[in-house]
Image: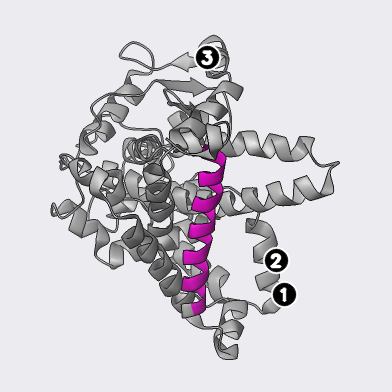
Amino acid sequence: MTADDDGTTPTAAASGGTPDATTPDRRRITLTGISSRAWEHPADRGALTALRELRGFDDVVRMFFGMWNERAFRLSYLASAIRVDHRQYPRVHRLLAEAATALDVPELPELFVTQSPVLGAQAIGLDKPFIVVNTACVQQLDDAELRTLLGHELGHVRSGHAVYQTILTILTRWAANLSWLPVGAIALRAIIAAMLEWWRKAELSGDRAGLLAGQDPAAAQRLLMKLAGGGDLSQIDTAAFLEQAAEYDGGGDLRDSLHKFRMTAWSTHPVPVARAAALRQWIDSGGYAQVLAGDYPRRADDPTASVTEEIKAAAQAYREEFGRSQDPLVGLLRRLGSGAADVGEWASGAAGRARSWMGAASSTGRPGGRRS
């Protein structure tokens, strides 16, 4: 049996066997008072900071809440899934508590295990989000991988992603209902496309949160490999998987670029190889080590977070991503002189337009259209 990338010995499940609760656990650091801004991707963080700062946005959220029967939705899981606690799925409950301790989450959200052969989990809800994990995760992931997955979902809850993802779900239903109305459907689809781009960045934030919760880079990479189809890790290799990511990013020609756009434009999640590469890049940049060393934003400072600075950081992130990308279409744009600066300006402008749209939405129903 070989050692993982960080020098630890894989559990039985990591080698294709069943989870081994007797495997010695590593010591994890409690990230006291950590703000969700510490793990949020800059593009995700900029959008969330702008929305949180926007006066009246809470009214918009309440409007959507009125359309979403959260109690009935939770009851459906209460009726047809297993609610996790110290008596039911105690292993999963323990791992959730450990992930929450690392992220300094004071209160555990409800967690349900639902029957499904597909590896997957989600955070759902507006007022009181809860987590749903498929049985495949419980059966196929070892402790370190499952802890990482639960940390990923806790990250979504702490960042408020569950709220905005639920709103996106409602908007998607609206788009389907308005498909007969060309103008309305086009406008709504444009909003949905922008929110899907945010959601994909939010998934990268969740991956970072999962890594910080488990504090095991090798397990985080194994999790993404299993999500891609690697149930038996004795048959696959981390380095080869990252080579796939590099080929996906830079291989082929313009036709491949267009195919990739079609694959991702209406998807909520980046493809697994892209997620693995993005997480590896964050680790290699020193961001992960910086947080573990205690250099991270605190929740106490969230009210004073600068919207302008966060949007600038989002624009810079797009510039850097544009500059790093080996995609043929991106390379062509660079050669034509569009440049990363234009991408940054586009990102800043898009963030501003999103804030303007949400500001207009939040002012509806008030005398004179004024916000409180």
Amino acid under disc 3: Arg
For disc 1, the marked residue is: 255
The secondary structure that dominates the magenta segment is helix
For disc 3, the marked residue is: 71
Look at the numbered disc 2 and give the secondary structure of its residue.
helix
For disc 2, the marked residue is: 259
- Residue 251 vs 207, above or below: the answer is below
- Residue 82 vs 329, above or below: the answer is above
Give me the residue at 70% from left, 69% from top: 258
Give me the residue at 58% from left, 18% from top: 69
> Disc 1 and disc 3: Cα gap in Å?
46 Å
- Residue 283 vs 218, above or below: the answer is below
- Circles 2 and 1: CB distance less than 8 Å? yes
Q: Is residue 308 left or right of residue 163?
A: left
One can see residue 289 in this view = yes
Image spot of residue 346 (x, y percent): 53, 69
> Disc 3 and disc 2: Cα gap in Å?
40 Å
Residue 93 inside the magenta-drawn segment: no
> Disc 2 and disc 1: Cα gap in Å?
6 Å
Image spot of residue 177 (x, y percent): 78, 35
Give me the residue at 25% from left, 32% from top: 105
Residue 255 or residue 224, whichever sits in front: 255
